[in-house]
Image (cartoon, rainbow, N blue to C red):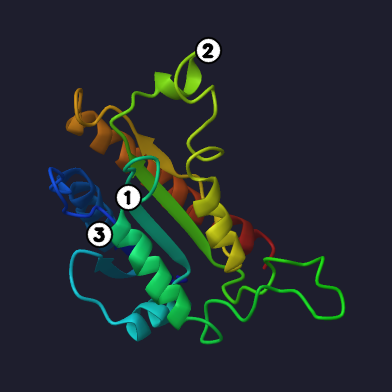
Amino acid sequence: METRKIFVINGGQVFGHSGGRFNHTIFNATLNFFKSQPGFEIRSTDINHDYDPIQEVENYVWADVIIYHTPIWWFQVPNGLKKYIDVVFTEGHQKGIYKSDGRSSANPDINYGTGGLLQGKKYMVTTSWNAPATAFTLPGEFFNQRSVDDGVLFGFHRMNAFTGMTPLTGIHFHDVEKNADIVNDMKLYQEHLTKTFINQKQENEYLSNSYN
């Protein structure tokens, strides 16, 4: 059985009135899920704790899939997660994350964003919001019917594309401050992980065996 290597990052920063509890719960659920399944190796980092940028670069290079867990603060990822990305990706320049911006001096107008070194790897992101899901879908509501991925996370997705990674379908949790339903959120998340990593893995193995 082929082993998939999963690197999980908890970006649920403890700051101000935020204790980071929801994302810590999601983070632990992810670790427990993969530990309970055969065929996975797992590494993890919590941005609230000290980390070694060199080791974090090695984690990215080692992994087949990177999973990010983050709240959204003021329509951005928390400053601690942003600092982590800045520090680690800078350390990863020509060391496994990206080589250059992809352009050549001969024609600098094209191929921007093609210098990543993580081709073939995938990433998944979960986000948590005070905003309800309807704020993204109803006409006249705050986000003008623009989805999380096409709106607030557009730059985050381009950042990962810059490294050469491609996205797996993520999951977004809404209204977690005023109307949290942790039991249902955990149920939905377990189903999402099973569909994304177990069902798909079994299908890929079936197809591979069919052609052997």
Note whether residue 199 is visible: yes
- In the displayed structure, would residue 109 be above or below residue 103? above
The secondary element bearing badge 1 is classed as strand
Q: Nearer the viewer, residue 136 or 168?
A: 136
| Callout in the foreground (2, 1) | 2
The part of the image, by quadrant, that contains residue 65 is: bottom left
Determine contact: label 2, label 3, CB under 8 Å.
no
Q: Earlier in the sequence, mark 2 or mark 1?
A: 1
The secondary element bearing badge 2 is classed as loop
Q: Which residue is mark 3?
A: 31
The secondary element bearing badge 3 is classed as helix
**Quadrant (top left, top right, bottom left, bottom right) of the N terminus:** bottom left
**Quadrant (top left, top right, bottom left, bottom right) of the C terminus:** bottom right
- In the displayed structure, would residue 68 be above or below residue 90? above
Q: Which residue is mark 2?
A: 139
Q: Residue drawn 82% across and 66% down?
A: 109
Label 3: how many residues lie within 10 Å, few (<14), some (14-19) or many (20+)? some
Q: Residue 126 vs residue 29: left or right?
A: right
Q: Nearer the viewer, residue 40 or 29?
A: 29
Q: Which residue is mark 1?
A: 70
In whole angstroms, how far apart are the C-alphas of marks 3 and 1?
15 Å
